[in-house]
Image (cartoon, grey):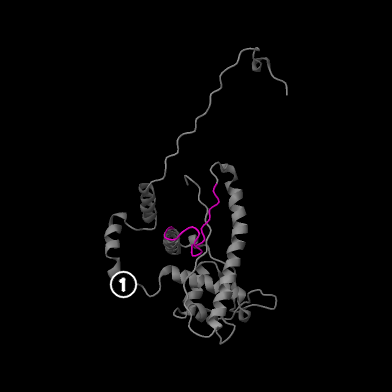
Amino acid sequence: MALSPKSVRPKGRSKARKVRVPAPVRAITVDDVIGDLLELFKQVGSDPTTIANRVLHIGSMPVMEVRPYDHAVAIGDLLTLWHQDPDFTDEVGNPLPLKMKGRQRSFSCLARRCLPKLDATKLLIELQELGAVSINPGGHVHLLKRSLNVYEDRELAKAYTLSTLRWFIKTLRHNLQSTPSNTDQLFNRVAWNGVFPEREIPKLKLWLSKHGQSLLLSADNWMMNKSKQERNARGNKKSTQIAVGLYMAVDGS
């Protein structure tokens, strides 16, 4: 590439280059985290000024029989069951359209397995509003989604946000209380990049949408199969709730 005369400097003379000194990165403090939490609580409709007082009295507060996100988890189980159980799939494993009522292979039967305390008609209306199912002129219910985007529904988004935040905190607390070599530590890994080009963020989101969804569906299927085996096994064995999740964080967003 040819240089213009203005770009050529006489020999023996050099101009000192300016070296860019990166701005010092301030360490994240407890106050930063608390500030972010208070902003998050504002977004989900909780008044930060009353939070401390409510926490002090949390032990005396009545516990709801079914928490909002437990309900969402049960809906997720329903969608998974519809994709997996031979009672609700065809010969190649695709979810079948279901009639509304019936002892076997019906939407009511499927609903009773996951949400026995909720009226099947109300559940169907809820799934329609979430865009998860449709009803054809013949009255059969068709499944449209394998999973739900919780942020399409305001109330579900609130419940999901708070539940996920609490689960994440519990994971960190558990790992802090056990030694790094302890096999009892919960899985917690982060892929971090400090100089990622902003223009590539949309491509990364698409990559995560494809590969992350596949991973979560695989985990969902694995856990569902284990739960099914546990139900079929003899004796009462201890069980608990498990959550496996992926998230993407962008500094400044």
Total marks in image? 1
Q: Amino acid at mark 1?
A: Pro
Q: Quadrant of the N terminus?
A: top right
Q: Which residue is mark 1?
A: 62
Residue at image point 54% right, 74% down: 78
The vertical placement of 81 against 202, above or below, is below
Position of 153 with respect to 29 (left or right) is right
Q: Residue 34: within the magenta?
A: no
The vertical placement of 231 against 220, above or below, is below
Q: What is the x, y in percent for residue 96?
A: 63, 77
Q: Is residue 145 visible?
A: no
Q: Residue 180: within the magenta?
A: yes
Q: Quadrant of residue 233?
A: bottom right
Residue at image point 61% right, 13% down: 13
Residue 77 vs residue 177, the one in the foreground: 177
Residue 29 vs residue 143, the one in the foreground: 29
Q: What is the x, y in percent for residue 94?
A: 66, 73
Position of 9 with respect to 57 (left or right) is right
Residue 181 vs residue 200, the one in the foreground: 181
Q: What is the x, y in percent for residue 85?
A: 61, 78
The vertical placement of 232 against 70, above or below, is below
**Element assignment for label 1:** loop
Q: Which residues are magenta?
A: 176-192
Question: How packed is label 1: few (under 14 Cα within 10 Å), some, or many (20 or more)?
Answer: few
Majority SS type along the magenta span: loop
The vertical placement of 239 against 201, above or below, is below
Q: What is the x, y in percent for residue 23?
A: 46, 34
Q: Is residue 76 visible?
A: yes
Residue at image point 59% right, 55% down: 208
Residue at image point 68% right, 17% down: 4
Q: Quadrant of residue 169?
A: bottom left
